[in-house]
Image (cartoon, rainbow, N blue to C red):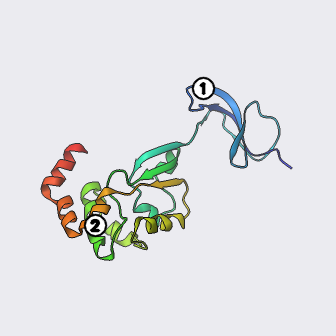
Amino acid sequence: MTDYDLIIRGGTVHDGLGSAARVADLAVKDGLIAAIGAVTGSASEEIDARGLLVTPGFVDVHTHYDGQATWENRLVPSSGHGVTSVVMGNCGVGFAPCRPGQHDILVKVMEGVEDVPEVVMTEGLPWNWETFPDYLDALQAREFDIDVAAQLPHSALRVFVMGERAGRCALSPRRRSGLARWA
């Protein structure tokens, strides 16, 4: 029987609390850090981290995975850069809530604001939701390589409530040029 699930040995540990970096071992048991320092004992998995950094996971508080999270399990590039949690929807664009007749409007808003090609969204989005809670349920049913949190995007809410009138406002040339100034 092993003492830990994982031991990361000899890495340069940055604890995220402002302490000086130090070379140490780090042991994990039941998903929690159980020891940091000179760890004795064994683990079912050990990683030699000599010459590597060991840090807390990073949280990216402004991402645009609203669509990608509905068709992709790996949220790259974030998950490849040490990010362990992402937040989406806070930029204002997204795909929920959305009535069935409003799909094209939200795709056009995302394409105009984020320069994501329309074909990527129209072929990738399953639209298996209407309300924001439905969207969260659709995300909850998926598995990701990192943790995902979502805020309700204001553009989708406006379109949901105001219909095409909100979409025309979001897509107007004056609005797009204003957005470009702030990008």
- The amino acid marked with disc number 1 is Ala
Residue 13 sits in which quadrant? top right
Q: Is residue 36 left or right of residue 79?
A: right
Q: Is residue 86 left or right of residue 50?
A: left
Marks 1, 2: nearer the viewer: 2
Q: CA distance from mark 1 to mark 2?
A: 51 Å
Residue 102 sits in which quadrant? bottom left
Mark 1 surroundings within 10 Å by alpha-carbon count, few (fewer than 14), some (14 through 19), many (20 or more): some
Q: Is residue 105 left or right of residue 130?
A: left
Outermost residue to the left: 174
Viewer-nearest residue: 26 or 139: 139
Q: Which residue shows up at 51% across the image and 62% down it?
A: 73
Q: Which residue is mark 1?
A: 21
Q: Which residue is mark 2?
A: 161
Residue 4 location (% of width, % of height) = 78, 45
- The amino acid marked with disc number 2 is Val
Q: Is residue 6 above or below residue 73?
A: above
Outermost residue to the front: 161
Q: Is residue 51 above or below residue 174?
A: above
Circle nearer the N terminus (1, 2): 1
Q: Which residue shows up at 55% across the image and 26% down it?
A: 18
Count of numbered labels shown in the rendering: 2
Q: Dot 1 lies on which element?
A: loop
Q: Which residue shows up at 40% across the image and 59% down it?
A: 66
